[in-house]
Every structure is written in structure tokens, then in C-alpha cells.
Image (spheres, grey):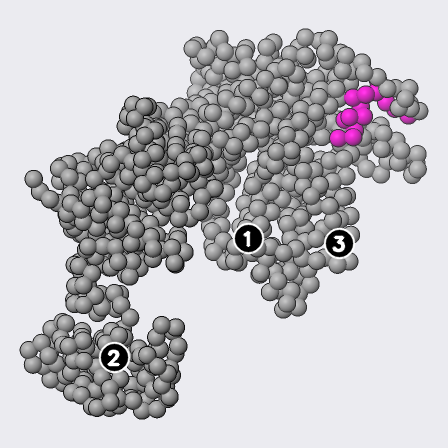
Amino acid sequence: MNKMPFSKIAVIILTAIAVFLPIGLLFWQSFLDAPFFQPDKMIGLDAYRFIFDDPDFKRAFLNSLYISCGMGLIAVPLGGLLAFLMVRTDLPGRRWIEPLLLIPVFVSPMILCFGYTVAVGPVGFISLWVQNILGSVPWNLYSMTSIVLIAGLSHVPHVYLYSSSALRSLGSDVEEAARVAGAGPLRVAATVSLPMVMPAMLYSGVLVFFLGFQVFGLVLVLGDPEGHLVLATYLYKLTNKLGTPSYHLMAAVAMCIVAITIPMVLSQRFLLRNAHKYITLKGKGARQRTLPLGGWRWVAAGLVAAWLAVTVVIPIIGVVFRAFVTNWGEGVTFLEAFTLDNFRSVFEQGNLMRGVINTILLGVIGGGLSVICFTFIGLSSHRKNNGWTRLLDYTVMTPRAIPGLLAGLAFLWVFLFFPPLAPFRKTLVSLWLAYSVVWLAYGMRLVSTSLLQVGPELEECARVTGATPGQVNRHVTVPLIKYGLLASWLMIFMIFEREYSTGVYLLGPGTEVIGSLMVSLWGAGAIEIISALSFINILLVSVGMGIALRYGVKLHD
Amino acid sequence: MTSIELSVHDLHVTLGKNHILKGVSLDVNKGEIVALLGPSGSGKTTLLRSIAGLELPSHGSIRIGEQMVFESAKKTEVSVEKRCLGFVFQSYALWPHRTVYDNVAYGLKLRKVPDGEIRPRVQEVLANLGLGDLSERHPHQLSGGQQQRVALARSLVYNPQVILLDEPLSNLDAKLREEARIWLRQLIIDLNLSAVCVTHDQAEAMAMADKVVLLKDGVIEQAGTPQEMYGAPKSLFVAEFMGANNTISGLVTDVDGDSARIEGNGWALHGRLRTPLKAGDRATAVVRLEKIKLVQTPKENSLRLPLTASVYLGNTWEYVFDLAGATIRGYGNEFMQPGEQLVDIPAEHLWLF
């Protein structure tokens, strides 16, 4: 219709710089034998040679692979089954299960794993209770098996989100036809419903697989006691291991992770393109009837309850409980140990208090600013399809392949050595930029979902009436998606409250946030403080969830 | 000064890989209403959107009034908002976040009309369209007919010389639609506007327009007054599109000027050639349903056919005859018992293609 105005191209180029400059820096650094800012550096493969010779790297890589595969094998079938039960059957209590399902998505894995150590670790309160009955604790929380199990169970919601939205868009007539033809509910699920949502399942399977390679907090907490490493924790511990910051090695590890995740993200795009072949098969409209489970109803409810207990209730109760006691062990009663001192010390220590305030600021103001940026980015490619918008597509997709830890590291380097940005390094601006880039894909999905709901003729009509493209955006498009943008703000707030790994390398006086403080305090073993911070973090996320539920904001699509 | 208000010349439009318009030329005179008619996928909406500037043609030219708004040879392209057209969308496209008043006033605000002038002008156009007391409502509080009139008010308030309407009546229910097309035609004539109206309903096109343009696969199949289009179709496609017909295929046996004789299995009829045919060609004979008459005495072009059914349609009866396995339908005023009837098919109304 008309050419791309310069302002839109500028937005797209800026976005591409924000995404690709840090990654490019990582890439370049990985081929140097010294930090890139040193004058005597040499280009070479030394960094790769070093890590490939390191037996720890090999073990970390195999563990990452093991966790990814295990996560896929656990999360995909359970997530699919959960989606079927929630969307298509008369499972009791679906209404209140729904928000609970999303807790593992909105509460940081650091907190959940911390909760596990407190509840079911070797001296956890549940472990002690079981020990009293059975004489010993029949599990080992810190084994690889437990780590894989917990990683798998806590990623069930990711699969659930994709499968359930696919199931929702499927007419229930195909299922009813199978029932009439003589199939029982389980058979319907196995032979009709799930095969029809296979593309969505496959998509989420790939998602879980590459999230497996990005796992950090979970193994940081649970892998520590027995020394299990994954790629991200190997990267994190490199500094300690060698005693000096070894940028080129860190960059090489980062490149190894990215080399695995980027092809996965690209393959998702390919899967999404093929997913449409089943959508044409969908029945008439959205008419959906629930499938009566009969006697299976309570079996299914028990299964979901057990999953919720293991994945959500035990760790959360563990954290909350620990936040209010001085110490815990055999023979201690809750009333004796009850205290508010943990919170008192948070409020008394300047850096912790700043962390809490920064987390709130970053979520509320930073989240709002991010949504504004995402809106500009979304508008720059709105109803356009050309080389620029394709560039933007890939730009937006790329950060999904970059674990927050790596993105934080890359941004640290950008802020350290790009002079015009240096003054911002010790301010929240650096964190905000890193957060916005890490969650770019997520945020853009929220914003573009709203944008796509605006009928094209509403915008065309404004053009015919005499409005310039800019006026159409200001007078028609943005006012129409106002509520969608507010909802996106809320979602970004929750995600920013949860984020812990992106801030790790950017942590310094002035840039403390709860998430990165927890990572650094974990190294120091400050259990009480971590529990108190976790409790505050859970409260903040709950406020977001409460607002979402109160105003009917959809927590997923 | 020319009286041609809108002129489209040899327009080609390609959307993606599809060649939608393949050379369409069209003139709209001042005060004339032109209906773009055609089956879905014929390119009629694309033509309308190209005139508005919402699609970019690959070749050709478009002139509105004295201004060339698109010319591929000179790479002229006037952007949508500067073409000063009225456009009524099929869905009306009322902005849901604005009141009726704000919807209508928007075009004037964009044209920097002084504030004091906007209110009286909006009120005047709303009053003209019978919407005077609805100005503070939001679109979702209006009925379909009211929404349609707001959409019209919004496109008329800044006095465009050409108004484009994309299936403006298709969202109204059947009864309202028949009233609205008369009302809409009168309004456009009263305002002395030039209008281009897309529709897929041939009755609506004939009722509203001074000129009907029938599109097929991106080219104009035939253009003319409603009378020409209905009474003198140039092709089988036009004949079938414009009205309800009986079609019979047969073999041309004898040609004499524009008259010819066509024969089938056990029947023979005289008709008029609409396309050049010669003896021995296979042809399709077409006659409008209302031209079929029952007669008492045999005429030059009558057949004795078995009546298989009489169907009551309320205002008329429809008779169904069997002609060598094909169905012939006609209208009458009373119920007829099944049995042999003498059916007259006037030769001047039997078109051979």
C-alpha cells in the first residue's frame, strides 16, 4: 500500500541492535584468548579448546542433555493430559485449579527449589516427619533423578498452556463423534483429541527441550550439595573455579548453549507454520461440551491434586514456613522457633531493602516502559510484510534462545565497554534493558495478540477519512488496544518480579533485585534472608495474580 | 471541464501471487451511481479498494475529479488520506471507542475545520440521516440500520465528491435492505454525488445503479444500464448472473441472420443468436423464467410438455416441466394439475449462446 516510513525502520533497527549487539559481543569474545577490552588479545579457538578439554564441561553438558530429555518425557505427556482434563472433561474444581497451574510459571524456580530443600531436603520438615514414621527418608532430593523429576514436573504448565489453547480452538463435535462410535473417554483422549493437537504438543515439546538447556536456578540450588553441574551453572562457577574472571571461557560456554537453543527456536517457527494443517479440521465454531469422566473423575482429580501438591504446595509451604522460623531441625517446634527477625533483617540491610524496592520499581515502572516499547515495535510491523518485518520477526524470536544469565552477562559487557552507556551500568536502566530484551518475545506476543484483534477496516476507514498512518495509530489503533496493553503491563510486571537470572551479572550497588540477591545469597548460605526475600517475592507475584483474577485478565491465551 | 468524476484506466492489481484485476477501465460521470457486480473472487472489492488507495495497483491509472491519484507510468501515488473520498465499509467499521458524534466529527477534525463549525455540520448531517438524537451513543448501542447510517454520515460529512460503498447493505436484514437501497439511491442523487457501490446481489445493483459493471475473473464481462444488462446480455455468464433462467443445451440446425433453430432430444425451438454460431454447433438456449407462458392454442414456438409440479410461492405459482430430462420452469397465477401442457417460449426471448 505504501512505503515503510523511516520512523518504523528506525524502531526495527534499534530493536535489532538491542538484541544482536550483546549476542554479537558474546560471539566475538568467545574467539578471543583474553577479555575483549584488553589490548594484547589474540583471535583463536583457545577458549573452546579449554572448555572441551575440561571434564566438568563434559559432565555439565551431559547433565543438561539428561535434564532436557527427562523434562520432555515428563512434561509433554503430563501437560497434554492435564490440558485434556482441564479443557475437555468435567474434572471437579477446574475453576480454582487454573490459577494454581500457573504458579510454576510465575514463581521463580530459585524459590521453588529453595522450598524443596526446606521441605523435603535431608533435614526438611516433611523429611523429618517421614523419618519419624518410616525410620529413614526414602528419597534423595539432591540426586540427578530428583532434579530431573522436579524440572519435568515444574515445566508441565508450559506444555499445558500450548496444548490447552489448541484444544480450546477445537470443536468438541469430533470428540462426541468418537463417543458415539463407541470409544471411552481415555480412548477419545488418546485417539482423537491428542492427535489433533499434536502440532501444539510437538511445539511445546521443543520448547521444554530448549528450556532444559537454559535451566539455571534449579540446578544451582538442588545440584550444589552433590556437585551436579549443568551448562548454565558451569558458566556461573567458572569464575570461582579459575579465580579470575575468564570472559573468553564464559563466552565460549554461552555460545555452546546458544548453538543448541537457536536451532530449536528456529524449528519451532517451522512447526508453527505446519501447525495450520490441523486447524482447518476444527469443528464448527467454539461450541464445546465437557466429556463426562464418570468414575474416572476422582482418579483424575487425585492425579492433578498430587501433581499440584508436589509442584506447588510443598515448595511454597516450605519457603513460607522457613521465612517465619529462626532455625529448624529435629526437636524444634514451630511456636518456639517462630520469629519475624528474618524480615527485620531484610528491612534493616540497605542492599536488601533496595533490592525489594528496585524489584517493585522494575516491575511497575520498568514493566510499563517495556510495554510502551513493545507497542512501538508492534506498531512498526503492524499490517506490513516485507524484508524489515521479517528481520523484526527473527529479532524478536532470538532472545528466547538466550538464557537470562547469558543475556545479563552480555549486557554487562555492553554497558561496561560502550562508553556512552557506561554511566547507566550501575542504574536500573541496565537491568531494565536486559529484562526487556530477555522477555521481548513474550511481551511482543502479548502486544501483537491485542493488535491482531483490531479489525483492519477500522484503521483503513480512518485512512480514507483523512488520517495519516501516525494519526491512525494515535487515534484508532492504540485507543482500541488500551485494555490489552494494560493487561500486558500486568503480565510483564509478574514476569519481571519473577526474573532472577538476568540480574546476576548486573548485580551491584544500585541494581539489586530480589532475584539476583537470592542467587548471590545462596552462595553465602543465608537461608533465613533468602526465605524472607522469597516470601516477599511470592507476595508481589500474588498481588499481580490477584489483580489479574479480579479484573478477569487472561493469564494465558 | 469534463463531467467524468472518476476514471479508471487499464488497472491491474496483484495481491501476493494472485493476479486479481487484469485490466479494468471504468468511467463514472458526475452524479452517476455505478454498481460493481460479480461473483466472489471476481475482483470487485479489490477494484473499490484500489480506487480508495487501500491496494496498490501494479499498472494503470486512476483519476478522481481533476487529480491523477494513481498512474503507474509516472509512478504517481496519492496516499489514501489525501484522496478525499467517502468510503462505507461492509462492516461499517465504526470506531467502537468513540460516540456517534466523535465518529462523524473525526473527518472534520482531521481537516482542521474550526471547532465552532464542526458541531453544526455534524448535527446537520446526522439530522439529515435521521440520527439527530443518537449523537452521544456508542456504536454498540445502535441497531444495524442506524450503524449503517452513521457510517454513511461519517463518510459524507466532509463533502467528498465520490463515495465508495462496499456491500453497504449486506449486513441489514432482507426487509430493511429493500427499503435502504431506495433510500440510499435517493440520498446520493439529492447530494449530486458520484458513487461506486460493490454488491453481489444483481437485484440490488439494478435497483440502485444507473450503470452496472459485471466483473468476472478480474475483467469486465459487460457494462451497461440495468435494462441492457438484464435484457440484452452479451454472454451466457451475464445472462445467468443477472436473472433466473431456464437453460437447455442442443444442436444448432439452421441459421438465418440473427435467428436460428436449435434441436434437442425430441424438441426444436427458434431463438435469437447472442453469439456467432453456425449450423452444427452445440449451443445453450436460455430463457428467463417470466417469459415462459402457458397457452391454449399452439404457436410458432410452443412445446407440449408434461407438468411435474406446481409450487406455491405466495405471490405466484411456479410450474415445473420436464423437457427430455431437463427442467423448465415458468410462472402462473393458479394451481395446475400434473399433466400435459402447451408451453410457449417466445423466439425473441430465447437466447442462444
Question: Along the line of sight, which residue is nearer the eye, A113 or A27?
Answer: A113
Kindly state the secondary structure of the residue where label 3 is placed. Answer: helix
Residue A116 belongs to the span the image colors magenta: no
Residue A371 against residue A272 in the figure, above or below: above
Whole-angstrom CA distance, mark 1 to mark 2, is 48 Å
What residue would you read off at disc 2? B292
Chain for numbered disc 1 = A
Residue B31 against residue A354 in the figure, above or below: below
Q: Dot 3, how many residues are within 10 Å of its Cα: few (below 14), some (14-19), or many (20+)?
A: some
Q: Which residues are magenta?
A: A316-330
Rendered residue at 21%/39% (across/down): B161
Question: Along the line of sight, which residue is nearer the eye, A545 or B339?
Answer: B339
Rendered residue at 43%/10% (across/down): A419
Kindly state the secondary structure of the residue where label 2 is placed. Answer: loop
Q: Which mark is residue A297?
A: 3
> Tag 3: residue type?
Arg
On the question of residue A275 being in view, the answer is yes
Q: Which of the image's four quarters has the C terminus of chain A?
A: top right
Rendered residue at 61%/36% (across/down): A552
Whole-angstrom CA distance, mark 3 to mark 1, is 24 Å
Chain for numbered disc 2 = B
Report x, y in % for residue A436. Answer: 51, 24
Report x, y in % for residue A509. Answer: 61, 9
- 1 or 2: mark nearer the eye: 2
Q: Are marks 1 and 2 in contact (CB under 8 Å)?
A: no
> Tag 1: residue type?
Ala
Residue B4 against residue A289 in the figure, above or below: above
Same-chain check, marks 1 and 2: no
Whole-angstrom CA distance, mark 2 to mark 3, is 68 Å
Report x, y in % for residue A226. Answer: 74, 28
What residue would you read off at disc 1? A286
